Image (tube, helix red, strand yellow):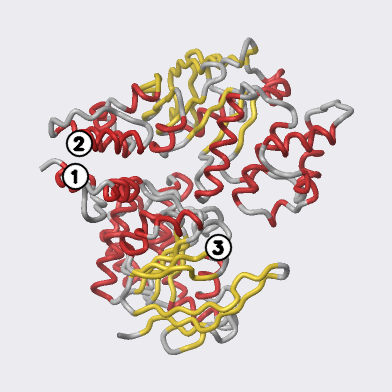
Amino acid sequence: MEIILKNVGYHYKNKKYLEKINLKIKSNTITGITGDNKTLLIELIDALTMASYGQIKIGNKEINRENLIDIRKTVCMIHQKPREQFFTTNVKEEMEFLIGRLDYKNKNIYKKMRNSLLIAGLSEEYLEKEIYQLSAGEQKLIQVAISLLYNPKIIIFDEPFAELDYTNKKKLLRLIKILKERYNKTIIIASNDSNMLYSLTEDIVILKGSHIIAADKTVKVYQDVEFLKYNDIAIPEIVLFVYKAKKKNIKLSYHKDIRDLIKDVYKHV
Amino acid sequence: MEKALEIKNLQFNYPEKEVFHNLSLTIEKGSFVTLIGNNKSGKTTLIKLICGLLDGKKSIIAGYAYVNNQRIHDNSRFFGVVFSDVEGKFLFNNVYKEMAFPLENLNIPVDKIENKIIELAKEFGITEILDKKIEDLTNSEKQELLIAISLLHDPKILLLDNAFSMMNKKTKEKIISILKHRVKKDQLTVILTTMNLEDILDSNYTYVLNQGNIVMEGVPLNILKEEKLLSQVGLELPFMIDLSLKLKFYELIKEIITDMDGMVNTLWK
């Protein structure tokens, strides 16, 4: 589902955090958001915070105070810290709590619970588990499973990999790709990890101060090293390496995968 | 060689889970040591045991005394501890007051406190945030401040539990060089836990933890050569290490190179 922000701004106590944001996030893509105030921007899209001015449209619905419940069912946010998002201590209770809140009516609700766990790569045994005994990685997957219960069209991740080790990171990366490709979700990832954003996302939005300074294809934005340097934005290492080689007149091309880069280097040495 | 910390046959269980079965390690005075491991490897538990927040039952010797959880007061002068979370770690809403508090507790005269804080703030380059409110700081600044505070009482051992998790790259580099300087000058012992293999390059010695056991120990560069074992315990190779190992495999370079300019210059002279 498409997201459109028209002339959106947010200020608080005379301080302007976001100003004149115009942005279109395409349906069924993985979009990265990086830079200052990125969490605020995704909170505006999730309607957790209301914009001071401007219009935000989720699909063809405009966010306002009357249709919050509809927006909640369409957009879901996976918070950075799982513990801040859970209300209860048990996976099943947490799922039931959400179903109650959203007034969700479905006869096969337990089948649905099991299915969402399976999509997230967890067995149905997890229904009976206590949330706080699970590892950070499992908690992250449980967060996703719970959100899948009501089948949101848009899933927003805030720094999803911050507390995950490599094994869990790989699991979550796979899940995000499946959500996009098999279940046609629109995915937004707010993060400052330029290496991850470069390899995972298709589009990227870069914020600086209260403005958007770039919103385009990830490859295009991240390969403009001079622009990133000028604006003090972290450069993906794989791009920086090629950039440094190019400065020495070596004709390497930009790659996303390190194996392709190695082949290229091999040809040029 | 003088020992700063010795752990002998440590055993520790949580009510439903065994964490350490039989762990032994020795840390030299005036060294920078990293403990690396994935989620659930026991890093945080070990830090809590070392500083006496959990009871190690006479298996931990720091300096010349056993650490146990009965004498928190003595431990707190000997250790500086910083955990990864920044929420709930501050008592005041003003940076200066927050920094003065631990020194007031040690009965240090007011004028000495002021000198000490200003001196430390200069070392860290944070003089301009001294009169700021804590709530106006970014997470990166909060972590920086917590590390600065932990050094105020000149601890013998500084324990950092993933304390760079939210820090931006520049700040992190600055803090690490300050710590390295103190290790050299004041014989400070630093123990840093992390999930990021890049962090171990700054240390003198590294322990790899997995499920409560030390699976490998040694000088960082030697640890990084064990690519297979590292991926088995769920650790991701940083870009430059990954690139080095792959190029070395094709015999394009001879040794691991962690500096990007150095790498480009070695490949294309």
Q: Quadrant of the C terminus of chain B?
A: top left
Residue at the extreme right of the image, as rendered: A107
The residue identified by callout 2 is A244
Residue at image x 87%, y 30%?
A108
Q: Quadrant of residue B25?
A: bottom left
The three-letter code of the residue at mark 2 reads Lys
- B109 or B152, which is in the foreground? B152
* Residue A166 placement (x, y as % from top left): 50, 49
For label 2, the crowd category at 10 Å Cα-Cα, with few meaning under 14, some 14 to 19 and many 20 or more, is some
Q: CA distance from mark 2 to mark 1?
A: 7 Å
2 and 1 marks on the same chain = no
Q: Could you tell me which chain the residue with mark 3 belongs to?
A: B
Provide the secondary structure element on which disc 1 rests. Answer: helix
Residue nearer the viewer, A196 or B69: A196
Residue type marked 1? Asp
Tell me the chain of label 2.
A
Residue tagged 1: B261
Question: What residue appears at the point 38 percent right and 81 percent down from the top-left corner?
Answer: B4
Determine whether B214 is above or below B232 in the image: below
How far from the left and from the top, in percent, is residue A119?
69, 35
The tag on residue A140 is: none
